[in-house]
Amino acid sequence: MPRLTHTARLEWDGSTGEGYRAYSRAHTGTAPPAGASLRLSADPHFRGDAALLNPEQLVVLAASSCQLLAFLSVAARKHVDVVRYTDDATGHLSADLRHARIERIELNPVVHVAAGTAEDLVLRLVEQAHEECYIARSLTSEVTVRATVRVTRRCPPPGH
């Protein structure tokens, strides 16, 4: 299989001439060929705009998204009917801001599956997905997954 590459482009305009406190941290990120762009900033602790996503949030979001996609893949291959998935993920930055790093990312997915699905099977698939998630494997941060499984009775389609 050929090696996959992913490209990204950042754009920032402004001036740092007035010093650290004065320049805008806002910038735009794109990842062609996707047409979407993101307005980004620094974390508010680093004088950024809290209304915009920041790089630390994007790392946590990438780990969470990769876990979701890996899980859906393994579940589909095992014919497990997943009907909803949410994750409230948290990243923990080290206290030493001079050598700051995201030390730990906690993923907390809530997996809703169709009636008749064994909870222990879903939890094994969550673990398998974690082992297959290349974002988690790429990070030096500890990534933990604490999943909750909810068995959901699927509603019939409208009109039935």
Image (cartoon, grey):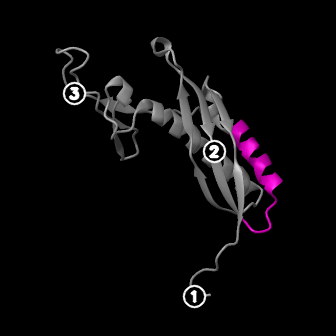
Kind of residue at badge 3: Asp
Which residue is identified by label 2?
A: 108
| First in residue order: circle 1 vs circle 2 | 2
Q: Determine the residue positioned at 61% across, 25% down.
A: 141
Residue labelled with disc 1: 159
Question: In what element is the residue under mark 2?
Answer: loop
For the residues labelled 1 and 2, the Cα–Cα distance comes to: 35 Å
Disc 3 crowd, CA 10 A, few/some/many (<14, 14-19, 20+): few
Residue 9 at x, y = what percent?
36, 32
Indicate which disc residue 13 carries.
3
74 horizontally vs 32: left or right: right
Measure the C-alpha gap from mark 2 to mark 3: 37 Å
Figure disc tally: 3
Q: For the magenta stretch, what is the residue range? A: 114-132
The spot of residue 95 in percent (x, y) is: 52, 18
Q: Where is residue 85 in the image (x, y as percent from the top left)?
A: 61, 55
**Quadrant housing the C terminus:** bottom right
Is 130 a magenta residue? yes
